[in-house]
Image (spheres, rainbow, N blue to C red):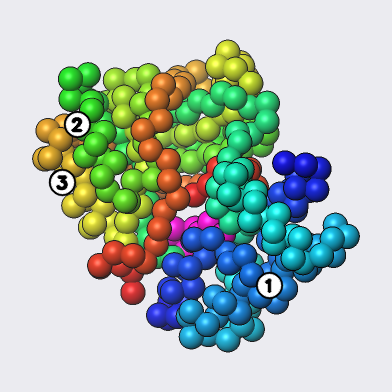
């Protein structure tokens, strides 16, 4: 990426213009034309430097329920358990952590009932559990302007 | 949400079109007008339905290579005060109060970011002094098994 690419990325990371001709607006700020902006953004996306150009939604505002889950999995069951847990598109993050509860994942689903169903299914299919479930009671801080934290 | 709004959510969680008038293209795909789409996106940004709108980049946060999930056993009556104290730290990106569970005594969570794991421990020690809470653990991730963006309104039984 050259300097101009970096300036484009900085601009559209902070906020993509919500306007009829957004690429022309970005070009106007940088002194280049609309087509050049579109061409450069295409190339940056093709290179993988931008993973996604779009919206990150607040699950609760869309009526979804989300939760944090943890489970103890013994080493011999780990591969199967991770495969079962990850098979649900509702699981967005899943990490191994240094604790007796060694597998931690986040789950987003249309309802609390669906969350309970999914957890029961995971326990049954992977032969693990009980999975503890720790839905947020209160949110004190979420820093949303970090480039890397997505969803 | 109306069916058109849900369709707009489905489209916006993919990539914005790389065309001269991307919102007009989104409008055509949802049955809304371009002005309605622009208005809806602005409204969702204003009310927090959209948390971020723009480019999500690949690289890690510069200079913050390590992160730790810190979990704290805080008397319930102090949870709010402690949560707010942690939230003031620029090294903490997320902070939540959560229920305790079987084998899990911790009710306040703070995600700590620092240059190294040792720095994360120092940050936690400082938070401990500031909040006056001694019982806590730092959980580092040794492996990432999955990290994706959620896709909404794509399954049967989704919220009406």
| Disc 1 chain ID | B
Q: Is residue A38 left or right of residue B146?
A: right
Give whichever of A36, A111 is nearer the camera: A36
The magenta stretch is A54-61
Q: Residue B87, located in which quarter of the rendered image?
A: top right
Q: Is residue A133 above or below residue A116?
A: above
In this rendering, the label closer to the viewer, 2 or 1: 1
Distance (Cα) linking label 2 and label 3: 14 Å
How far across and down, in percent of the image, does residue B21 sit? 66, 75
- The secondary element bearing badge 1 is classed as loop
Instruction: State the mark number for residue A121.
Output: 3
* Residue A60 is a magenta residue: yes
Subunit of mark 2?
Answer: A
Q: Which residue is mark 1?
A: B20
> Helix, strand, or loop for circle 3?
helix
Q: Write the residue at 49% across / 61% down.
A: B13
Marks 2/1: CA–CA distance: 47 Å
Residue under label 2, please give it.
A80
| Quarter assignment of residue A103 | top left
Task: For label 3, count other residues whose C-alpha is less than 10 Å away and answer few (under 14), some (14-19) or many (20+).
Answer: some
Q: Which residue shows up at 74% across the image and 65% down it?
A: A35
Camera-nearest residue between A115 and B22: B22
**Depth check, front residue: B24 or A77:** B24
Task: Give how far across and how far down residue A49 sits, in percent.
Answer: 61, 43
Where does residue A76 sit, x and y in percent of width and height? 17, 20
Let me know if residue B13 appears in the view: yes
| Callout 1 crowding tier (Cα within 10 Å): few <14, some 14–19, many ≥20 | some
The answer to whether marks 2 and 1 sit on the same chain is: no
């Amino acid at each position: 990426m050259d300097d101009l690419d970096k300036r484009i990325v900085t601009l559209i990371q902070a906020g993509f213009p919500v306007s009829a001709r957004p690429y022309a607006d970005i070009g106007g700020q940088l002194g280049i034309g609309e087509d050049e902006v579109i061409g450069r953004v295409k190339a940056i996306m093709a290179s993988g430097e931008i993973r996604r150009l779009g919206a990150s939604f607040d699950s609760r505002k869309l009526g979804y329920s989300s939760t944090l889950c943890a489970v103890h999995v013994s080493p011999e069951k780990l591969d199967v358990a991770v495969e079962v847990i990850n098979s649900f598109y509702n699981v967005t993050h899943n990490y191994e952590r240094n604790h007796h509860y060694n597998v931690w994942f986040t789950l987003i689903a249309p309802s609390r009932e669906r969350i309970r169903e999914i957890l029961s299914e995971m326990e049954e299919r992977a032969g693990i559990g009980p999975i503890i479930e720790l839905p947020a009671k209160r949110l004190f801080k979420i820093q949303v302007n970090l480039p890397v934290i997505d969803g | 949400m109306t069916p058109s709004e849900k369709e707009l959510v489905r489209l916006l969680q993919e990539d914005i079109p790389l065309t001269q008038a991307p919102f007009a293209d989104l409008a055509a795909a949802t049955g809304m007008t371009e002005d309605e789409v622009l208005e809806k996106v602005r409204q969702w940004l204003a009310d927090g339905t959209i948390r971020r709108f723009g480019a999500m980049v690949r690289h890690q946060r510069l200079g913050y290579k390590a992160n730790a999930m810190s979990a704290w056993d805080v008397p319930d009556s102090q949870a709010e005060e402690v949560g707010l104290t942690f939230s003031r730290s620029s090294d903490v990106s997320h902070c939540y109060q959560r229920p305790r569970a079987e084998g899990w005594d911790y009710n306040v969570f703070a995600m700590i970011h620092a240059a190294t794991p040792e720095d994360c421990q120092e940050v936690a020690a400082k938070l401990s002094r500031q909040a006056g809470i001694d019982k806590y653990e730092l959980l580092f991730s040794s492996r990432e098994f999955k990290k994706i963006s959620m896709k909404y309104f794509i399954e049967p039984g989704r919220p009406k």
